[in-house]
Image: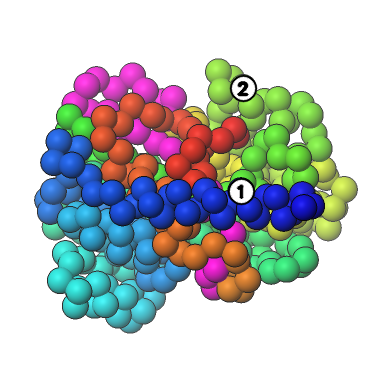
Amino acid sequence: MGKSEKAKERRDQRLNEISLLRTIPYSDHQRWWSIDTIAVVTGSNRGIGFEIARQLVAHGLTVVLTSRDDAVGEEAAKVLQEGGFNVAFHQLDVTVPSSITDFADWIRESYGGIDILVNNAGVNFNVGSDNSVDNAEMVISTNYYGTKNMIKAMIPLMRPSTAGARIINVSSRLGRLNGKRNQIGDLAMRDKLADIDTLTEEFVDEMVSMFLKQVEEGTWASGGWPQTFTDYSMSKLAVNAYTRLVAKTLSDRPEGQKIFVNCYCPGWVKTAMTGYAGNIPTEHGADTGVWLALLPDQAISGKFFAERREISF
């Protein structure tokens, strides 16, 4: 058996294990949430986002489903509402600051606050062996700045509780610092990104701006950036770094006001984003995000997960 066959065997075995874990109901003492628990899932009109929303409402939470397109979002919410679930919809474009502000105002007026934020909204314009950066600005704007700006807008609205509020950022292994085949070539930059004690938001923004400047100048190919899905990988590298930064910033909040921030890789999921070429069904792709959102006795923050296991950044 070759390496790829062995990897597939291990993946399939783990997915089967997770499928079994998902059939085990949470006990009453584990269920810190109720119908009054509010979860916001961005980009949840289809794919992984819709499945995360579906699994959360199935566990008895109230979910706010969002989409850039009103009609598409309302239809997606209607599907869940017809299943008897407690779902609301509000339009949201994470690339538009005024849209985020309008959404935050609506949340405040409608619910007073939220308990869970899942930053799922994202775009990718490459499939197969493609590696175009023609849409790099849109990819970075949506995947990184959209995630960052939503976190900043929602933190003031996250309600205090003994269980702690939760932020989950949907990311990717393609954004890992120490991946075997998709690393940043600049060792000094990689070291700075790895050092959480000295890492700053400004440095992450500068890195992203440098990449976009090289894209504009046409020199990005020799810049030492990740080699696979370069713009998407850069956006997720930035998301991973920002996840750690926010977790560190929020770590000293007192008990009852904790906010736990983590990111996870759903895998190569069979959705529109992968051109339906993925090898993982959406229910598996959503699973770790839902698991992180609902963890009883949550004390984990600033970590990266895949298949319900912590992985390295």
Label 1 neighbourhood size at 10 Å, few (<14), some (14-19), many (20+)? Answer: few
Looking at the image, residue 86 sits to the left or right of residue 53; the answer is: left
Label 2 neighbourhood size at 10 Å, few (<14), some (14-19), many (20+)? Answer: few
Q: Which residues are magenta?
A: 247-273
**Helix, strand or loop under label 1:** helix
Whether residue 149 is visible to the viewer of this picture, yes or no, is no
Query: Is there a contact, CB below 8 Å, between mark 1 and mark 2?
Result: no
The residue most toward the right is: 222
Q: Please identify, in this view, whether the residue under mark 1 or under mark 2 is nearer the observer.
A: 1
**Helix, strand or loop under label 2:** loop
Residue placed most toward the observer, 102 or 158: 158
Task: Tell me how the rendering is colored.
Answer: rainbow
Q: Is residue 162 above or below residue 83?
A: above
Whether residue 262 is visible to the viewer of this picture, yes or no, is yes
**What residue is at 15 percent from the left and 36 percent from the top?**
29
Residue 175 in percent (x, y) is at 63, 45
Name the disc covering residue 67, or none: none
Looking at the image, residue 177 sits to the left or right of residue 289; the answer is: right
Residue 166 in the magenta stretch? The answer is no
**What residue is at 19 percent from the left and 26 percent from the top?**
256
Q: What quarter of the picture does the C terminus occupy?
A: top right
Q: Is residue 260 above or below residue 129?
A: above
Q: Disc 2 marks which amino acid? A: Asp
Residue placed most toward the observer, 112 or 15: 15
Q: Is residue 4 above or below residue 309?
A: below
Name the disc covering residue 10, or none: 1
Residue 303 in percent (x, y) is at 48, 33
User: Which residue has dot 2 on it?
Assistant: 195
